[in-house]
Every structure is written in C-alpha cells, then in structure tokens.
Image: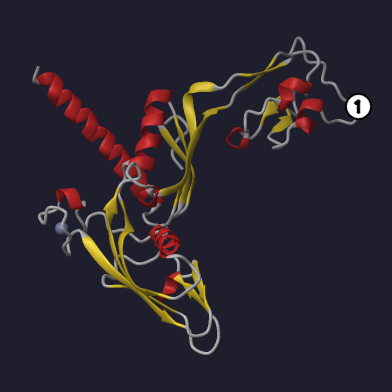
Amino acid sequence: MSSSNSLVEIVDLKDLFIRFILRNSNVAFANALRRIMISEVPVMAISDFAIINNTSPIFDEILAHRLSLIPLTTDLDGFNLPEKCVCGGVGCPRCQVTLTLNVKAGDSPVTVYSRDILSSDPRVVPVSGDFPIAKLSAGDEILIEMYARLGKGKDNARFQPVSACAYKYFPRIVVNTSSCIKCSSDGTLKCVSECPKKVLDVDSKTGYPYLRDPINCSLCKACVDICEYGAIELKPDDTSFIFYVESTGSLPVHKIIYTAATILAEKCDEFLSKIGGL
Ligand SMILES: [Zn+2]
C-alpha cells in the first residue's frame, strides 16, 4: 500500500478489481479518467457473424447479440484497431481473429456454453467457459463463424472493458462537540447504531462518534438525520475520490487504468500541440 500522503493510495487490488483513493485532484479529472476507462480503452469483442446453420429455438439476432457480449481476453499490444491497421479495416491477422461455434445435439438436449467457442488465436478466447449461450433440443445444430476485433465502448457496449467504474467523494464527518450530548444509555450512540454500513464508532478516549471506516461510508447521511442536536455534519472532501473499478475480464484492471491515463495524456499532448501551433 502506498503512503496515505501520496496522490494515489491503493486500498485493494486484485486481478479484476481495484479500489483506490485519488487525492489532490478535482471532479473534472476524476470524471475524465472514469469516462475514458468506460468508453475509450479498446478491447476485443465479436463484431461480425456468419450464421451458417441455426436450428435452435433462439433467433439468429438474439444469438448474435449474446455472442457479441461475451468478454474475450485481449492482447492490446498484439492487435491493431481496424481503422488504424495496414489493411485499412478490411480484416487481417493483425486486427481480426476468427472464432467458430459448432455444436450438434445428439439424442438428448445439450446446453451450449462459451467453452464450445473455438478461436484461431489462443490470445483471444472467452474469459470464462461457463457462459450459457443456448439450449439445443435433440438433433438441433448451431454452426457460426465469428470475427472478433478491437473496438471502443463509445461505439458499442460490447467493447466496454469495465463492468463497474465509479467514484465517490472521500467522506469526512465533523462532530460538533459543543452540541453532541453522547445520547445513549446502553453505551452505543444513536448515530453509531443508525449507520447502515456500520462505519461509525465511539472514540474510546473522548466518547464522541468518529468515522472509523471512510472507505465503506456511502454518504447516506443517516447519522446526520438521526441526530436531534445537529451535532454531526457530513462534509465530503471534493479533492479526494474513492474509485472502484471492476474489469469484465478482457484486460487486467491495472492495464485498463494505465491505458486510460495514457489516452488522457495523449489528448492533453494533442491539445497542447494544437494550441502551440496557433
Ligand atoms: Zn488489419
């Protein structure tokens, strides 16, 4: 964990999710980072289909929609965006991967899973084999050829690399000690017991409430509302943000944030070069 004085403090980091605190910043920067993570970090997704045979009860369009939303592992450095590829976006091994789904039910019903999708490139496969796609009755068949490419979330949700990406102000709770009467007879203050997230506690030295767990505070103001004496104020810090980012599995979450920050820096560089050229 980084020092609590640093610009970024990582609270929790796993391969697929991260919780971190961004300090000494502002809403404009935090929101720019969030929006770029959602809409501009490219990932692989299935975008074109050749449905050769589909005798399942599911319409071709629904089947294509389901397949397109299956997250695929992405090698960002190994592929080009089609619009920037040497092939001009027609489709070549540098910008496109072919996948096939070929399942035929025998004498009994079969569930088709994402593990049945075969990829021509081991770098681009479904992130999990456990996504159900269709149920086939005896004798039904699905044969589809699919083409995956890099794309951006702003063009289609199938290219969104995050399943959750949000921030909230860092909560601060101020207790007015001249108003607070430490209202309770059973040893627990009303504001402490009212908190649905149980993030408040009683200071063992002073007896006044304090915010023990700011990360899990949802800023619901239940503590402020329950206090009859107006002794509690919720004052979010609008220069610090608690971010929560969860990857769909296409990219490791740290790669998503790194790429988003790089894209934001490139945008700033482009802006500066244009301004410099005036
Ligand atoms: Zn190409």
Q: Residue furthest right?
A: 185
Disc 1 residue lies near ligand 1 with CB under 8 A:
no
Residue ID at (26%, 70%) = 121
Q: Nearer the viewer, residue 258 or 119?
A: 119
Determine whether 10 is above or below 176 in the image. Answer: below
User: Can see residue 3?
Assistant: yes
Q: Residue furthest bottom?
A: 107
Position of residue 184 measured from the top left corner of the image (x, y, whole percent):
87, 25
Quadrant, the C terminus: top left
Q: Nearer the viewer, residue 7 or 155?
A: 155
Position of residue 74 measured from the top left corner of the image (x, y, whole percent):
31, 58
Determine whether 90 is above or below 12 in the image. Answer: below
Q: Is residue 105 left or right of residue 49?
A: right
Task: Label 1: state its secondary structure.
Answer: loop
Instruction: Point out the quarter of the image occupied by ligand 1.
Output: bottom left
Q: Nearer the viewer, residue 111 or 130?
A: 111
Quadrant for residue 266, please give it: top left
Residue ID at (75%, 13%) = 230
Q: Is residue 142 left or right of residue 86?
A: right
Determine whether 146 is above or below 244 in the image. Answer: below
Position of residue 82 measured from the top left corner of the image (x, y, whole percent):
19, 53
Quadrant for residue 120, please give it: bottom left
Count neighbours of disc 1 (C-alpha within 10 A) and say few if under 14, some if 14 to 19, many if 20 or more: few
User: Can see residue 24?
Assistant: no
Label tally:
1
The amino acid type, in three-letter code, at marker 1 is Ser
Q: How is the image coloured?
A: secondary structure
Identify residue for label 1. 185
Q: Nearer the viewer, residue 124 or 6?
A: 124
Determine whether 117 is above or below 94 in the image. Answer: below
Position of residue 149 measured from the top left corner of the image (x, y, whole percent):
26, 57
